[in-house]
Image (cartoon, coloured by chain):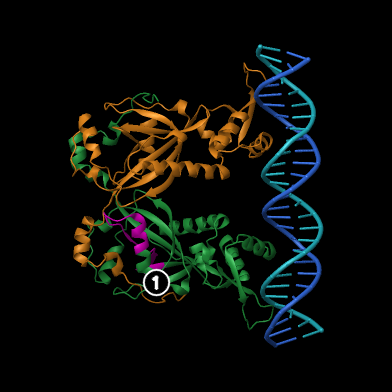
Chain colours: A orange, B green, C cyan, D blue
Amino acid sequence: MKFICGKMSQSIIFAGMELKEFFEHGTDYYLPHLSIDLVIIGYQDNRLKCLLLKIGEKWLLPGGYIQTDESVDDAATKILMNRTHLEDPYLKFLSVFGDKDRQFSNEWKEYFEKAGIPWNEEYWTNKRFITLAFYSLVDINKTHPEVGEYDEAFFWFSFDELPEMWMDHKSIVLEARNRLKQDIKHEQISYNLLSNYFTMPELNQLHQAILEKKLDRSRFQKKMLASGMFERLPKLQKETPGRNPYQYRVKKEEFE
Amino acid sequence: MKFICGKMSQSIIFAGMELKEFFEHGTDYYLPHLSIDLVIIGYQDNRLKCLLLKIGEKWLLPGGYIQTDESVDDAATKILMNRTHLEDPYLKFLSVFGDKDRQFSNEWKEYFEKAGIPWNEEYWTNKRFITLAFYSLVDINKTHPEVGEYDEAFFWFSFDELPEMWMDHKSIVLEARNRLKQDIKHEQISYNLLSNYFTMPELNQLHQAILEKKLDRSRFQKKMLASGMFERLPKLQKETPGRNPYQYRVKKEEFE
DNA sequence: TCAAAAGTGTTCCTGTTACACCCATGT
DNA sequence: ACATGGGTGTAACAGGAACACTTTTGA
C-alpha cells in the first residue's frame, strides 16, 4: 500500500512555542485541573431524586479528584463507593464539562472558614477545573451516606425541585436527567433504581416518572417480559384492595 | 422545606491527607495530564475513512492540549481548524479515555530524535495522559492539511484497513466508528460527509457504508425527504447510462 | 431496443396504541 | 356486591421491509 499522500504540520501541537520551551515548561499553559462529579440518581415516593451536598447557601454534586496513577473509571467508582457504601453500583460516564470559567468563586471563602477549613485563593482547588461527569442509578434504601467531620448536609432532591447550585452543577444534573430518559428507551437499566424484588406496576410507574408520560400497562408488561431479563416470583401479599401482583427480580444469569 | 437529613463525610475528597498538605501539595497526586484526540471521519471511493498521522512505525490520531484558560470545546475546535483548515466543521464529543497506563513508550525516543526533536523521558508529554476524544465529520475534498516542518505523513485510512496504531488510539477510532453508526439512526448528520450538492443514491450509498448493510432505495428516499431537511434542485447531468438523479442540498433555513 | 440507473407505488408484516375484558382481593 | 387494582387479549393503526413498476438515459 502506498499511503504517503503528503505532509501535515506537526508544529501545531507546539502552539508556536520553541520546542525546548514547550517540552520543559508546557505544563504552565497546558495542564488544566481535572475533577470528577457524580450525579447519583435514586427513586423514592414516585419521584426521581438526586443526591446533593450543601455548602453554605447552595448545593453541589458529590465529587473528587483523579490520582495521576489511577484510571478514570477506578477513580469514579472509588468516589461513588466512598460516598454511598454501595456494593455493586451502576455507574456510567455522562459527559465532560469544560467551560473556561468553571471555578469556585470567592463566596466559598466564608463557608470554608466557618467549617474550620483553611482557604486561600491560590490553592489549586480554587483554580479553573474541567470535570468528568458520571451518573449512577442507585436504590436509595441501600445507600448509607456517612456522617463526616464537617458540618455539611446531604439531601435527595426531586428533579422538579432542585435548589440553587454552585457553578454549572445544575446543568450537569439536567443533562444526566435527560440522558437517563434516552438510555431507558434502549437499555434495561431501570431496575437499578428499585429494590431487588419489585412488581410490574412499580416498574411501570418508575418508567412513567423517568419518561414523564403515561405508558400503557398492557404493552409495558409484555415488553418487559419479552426482554427476558426478569424472573417471575410468587405473588406479593398486599393489604390493599385489588388483585395481588407478581413479584419479579432480575434473572441471575444476567450477572454470570 | 426541611432538607437536612443527616451528614455526609467531606473527608473523602481529602483522601486521608492532612488538610494543609492536601491544599498545598494535592497537585502532586491529583493533577493527571489531559489531552484531546480527534477522530476525523471522511467518505471517499464509497468507503468511510479516518485521518491518521505517521510517527515511526505506527500511526496516531491528530490531537493537542487544552490551555488552562481555554474551554474544552474551543480547544478541540482550534485543533481541528489548524489540522484541516475547515470553516464550519461538525465536531462532537465522543468519550473520555483514561486508562492508568495511557502513555507513550520508549519506542518514541528514536523517532523523535530522528526528526530532530529533543526527547527526554521526564518531559511532561511522556507522562500518563487522560484524553478527551472528539469525532468530526468532514468533506475530504474541503480539507487542506498543511505540509509542516516535521517529516510526518498523513493518510486517509479506510476503517477496514486500519494500520498499527500507538497506544489505545485504535480503540478510540473504533468507538467513533460505532458511535457514528448509532447517531446516524437518530440524527440527520451524514450530509457533513458529502459535498454541498449530492444525490439521493449517493446519500443512500453513504448510509449503507456507515451502517454496513443494504438499505431499500424506495424507503430511504421517502424517509430522507420526509425529514424536510433537504431541498430538491435541478437534475444532475450524467454521462453514464440511466436516468439523471435530482441533486439536493441541505435547506438554508437549517443554518439560520 | 436493451441494459442500467433512478423515481415512485403496492403489498405484506411487525410492533405500537388504545381499549376492553376478566380475575383477585378488601371493604 | 362493589370498588379497586392487576393480568391478559384484541382490533386499529403506523411505520418498516421487500418488491414491482415506470421513466430516463447511453450505447
A159 lies left or right of C3? left
Above or below, A242 against A4 in this view is above
- Asked if residue B65 is among those painted magenta in the image, a careful observer would answer yes
Report the quarter where the N terminus of chain B lies: top left
Residue A92 shows up from this direction? no
The part of the image, by quadrant, that contains residue B39 is bottom left
A10 lies left or right of A245? left
Q: How many labels does the image show?
A: 1
At mark 1, the secondary structure is: strand
- Asked if residue A54 is among those painted magenta in the image, a careful observer would answer no
Residue at 38% from the left image edge and 64% from the top image edge: B60
The part of the image, by quadrant, that contains residue C12 is bottom right
Residue under numbered circle 1: B154
Residue at 35% from the left image edge and 32% from the top image edge: A53
Q: Where is residue A94 in the image (x, y as percent from the top left)?
A: 43, 45
A9 lies left or right of C16? left
Above or below, A59 against B196 in this view is above
Q: Where is residue A247 in the image (x, y as percent from the top left)?
A: 62, 26
Above or below, A159 against B194 in this view is above
Query: Which of these two is toward me, A87 or A83?
Result: A83
What's the magenta region?
B52-78
Residue B241 shows up from this direction? yes
Residue at 57% from the left image edge and 36% from the top image edge: A207
**What amino acid type should be assigned to the residue bearing mark 1?**
Phe
Q: Position of residue C10 (x, y in %)?
A: 80, 61
Query: Which of these two is toward me, A148 or A251?
Result: A148
Q: Position of residue B4 (x, y in %)?
A: 36, 24
Question: Which chain hosts label 1?
Answer: B
Above or below, A211 against B42 in this view is above
